[in-house]
Image (cartoon, coloured by chain):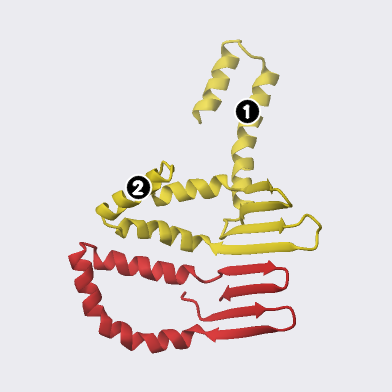
Chain colours: A red, B yellow
Amino acid sequence: MIPLIALMELGGKHHSIRLWLPLFLVWLLMLPLAVLMLPFALLAMLLARIQPWTALRAFSDVLSGLCGMQLEIQIPGRSVLVHIY
Amino acid sequence: MSQHRRQILDMLASGKINADEAERLISALERDPASANAENATKPQPKYLRVIVDADEEGDGETLTRVNIRVPLLLLRAGVRLTGLIPQEARERVNDAMREQGVAFDMNQLRPENLEELIEQLNDLSVDVDHANGQAKVRVFCE
C-alpha cells in the first residue's frame, strides 16, 4: 500500500510546527503528470537497457515500502520528527 | 518409520544400548522437531529495522542527542532489488569509488538473499561509542 499521509513536526526551543501532509492528494495530482512522462521514461529505459516492467515494479516496491517509516531526531533545543503512514 | 528411529531400534537389537536408553533416545527424537516448530511459530517475522542513537555530547546528561529511525524492511528489500537496475558500468564505477575509500565492496554480490541473512543475524546489535567529551550508544535491531 502506498503511503497516504505524512506527519512532519519541527520543534524549537519555544514553539513547534506540526504538519499533516495528505500524500494521497499529491499522488492524485502527480498521476496526470506521470501519464504524460511515461513515454519519455520508457524511452530512457530502453536506451539504458533496463526492463520497463522490472523498473516499474522496483519503483512501486520502494513507494509501498515507505509506509511505516519513522524518523526522530532530537538535539538540545531542536527536534525533527517525520512519520509516514 | 524414520531413519533415526530405525537406527535406534537396530542399536537396541544388536545390544549396543539397553531398552531404557532406546526409550530416552526415541522420546528425545520426538521432542526436538516439535519444540523447533513451536519456536518458529511463536517467533514473529521482523518488519522494521530500528536504529536508536543516544549521544551525550558533553557527558553531563543535559546535552542529550537522540536519533530514532525505523525503516520498513520492505523498503530495504526494494532498495536491494533496485541495485539490479543499475547498469554494469555504473556498478563498476561505484565499486572503484568504494575501493578508493578503502572499502572492499562488490555491488555485484548484493542480492536479496544476503539481506535476509543479515536480518536473521541482526537480532540485537548494540555499540557503545566513547569520544573525547561524551559518550554515545548505538543500537541496531529488527522488530
Q: Nearer the viewer, residue B98 or A2?
A: B98
Instruction: Tell me which corner region of the image, top left, top right, bottom left or bottom right, holds residue A15.
Output: bottom right
Judge by depth and name the residue closer to the eye, A31 or B33.
A31
Q: Residue furthest front?
A: B132
List x then y, in percent, for residue B77.
44, 58
Task: Name the chain under label 1.
Answer: B
Image position of B133 (left or right of B17): right
What residue is pinned by disc 2? B95
- Please report the residue visible at 80 percent of the width from the left and 59 percent of the height from the top: B61
For the image, the number of numbered tags is: 2
Q: Position of residue A49 (x, y in %)?
A: 20, 62
Q: CA distance from mark 2 to mark 1?
A: 54 Å
Q: Is residue B91 left or right of residue B15?
A: left
Do the residues indicated by labels 2 and 1 lie within the same chain of the protein? yes
- The residue shown at (51%, 47%) is B118
Q: Give amino acid for label 2.
A: Asn
Q: Which residue matches tag 1?
A: B26
Q: Earlier in the sequence, mark 2 or mark 1?
A: 1
Instruction: Examine the image and state in which quarter residue B78 appears.
Output: bottom left
Which percent across, then down, holds residue B64?
74, 62
Query: What is the chain letter for disc 2?
Result: B
Q: Position of residue B130 (x, y in %)?
A: 70, 47
Residue B80's image quarter? bottom left
Q: Is residue B111 above or below residue B25?
A: below
